Amino acid sequence: MTFDSETLSIRKPLWVALSDLFLDTELQEYDLAFIARKMHESGYSIDEIYDILMLEVFPVCIANLYFVAGEWAGFDENWVVNTILSAKRPNRFRRWMNNRHFWMIEKNWEDLVKRFNELQIK
């Protein structure tokens, strides 16, 4: 994937924050608050953030939830960014598979949407 420098400067912190949804650990209140804040700071709408999650972050991070002892302390920021940048955009089959596995992060996503909307009101 290719992004201009301005887009990349906005996307990087958002990618890293959203990658926490795929850690092999239960996210705490402060984790969710941090991710929601990064979502808000990005300036993207919730629909745009959902697309970024599903088309850019989900494809490179979902495998971690399938490992018995997956990453739990946090993904390396450089790994997240470089892996997303070197990934191809998901094709229709991959998007369908991603949607079928969304249930794995759905509860946290719903909580993030609520928190994001609260931040938008302030």
Image (cartoon, helix red, strand yellow):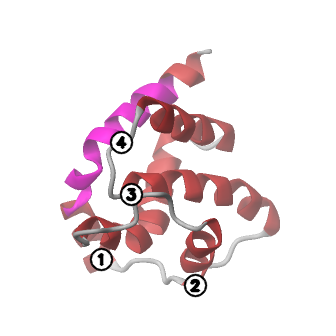
Report, in whole angstroms, how far the alpha carbon at label 3 lies from the one at label 4. 13 Å
Viewer-side label of 3, 2: 3
Contact flag, marks 3 and 4 (Cβ < 8 Å): no
Residue type, mark 1 in image: Arg
On the rendered image, what quadrant is the C terminus found in?
top right
Report x, y in % for residue 48.
Answer: 52, 49
Indicate whether 49 appears above or below 7: above
Which residue lies under the disc numbered 2? 86
Residue type (three-letter) at the residue carrying disc 3: Leu
Specify whether 115 is left or right of 83: left
Position of residue 82 relative to residue 56, above or below, is below
| Mark 3 → mark 2, Cα distance in angstroms | 21 Å
Amino acid bearing label 4: Trp
Q: Which residue is mark 4?
A: 109
**Residue found at x 18% / y 63%:** 100
Front-most of residues 32 and 67: 67
Q: Which residues are magenta?
A: 101-117
Mark before the other along the chain sequence, 2 or 4: 2
Helix, strand or loop under label 3: loop
In primary-sequence order, the first of circles 3 and 1 is 3
Rounded to the nearest angstrom, the CA distance separating label 4 from label 1 is 20 Å
Residue type for callout 2 = Ser
Which element type, helix, strand or loop, lies under badge 4?
helix
Question: Which residue carries the number 1 mark?
Answer: 94
Q: Which labelled disc corresponds to residue 23?
A: 3
Give the Cα separation between the discs numbered 2 and 4. Answer: 25 Å
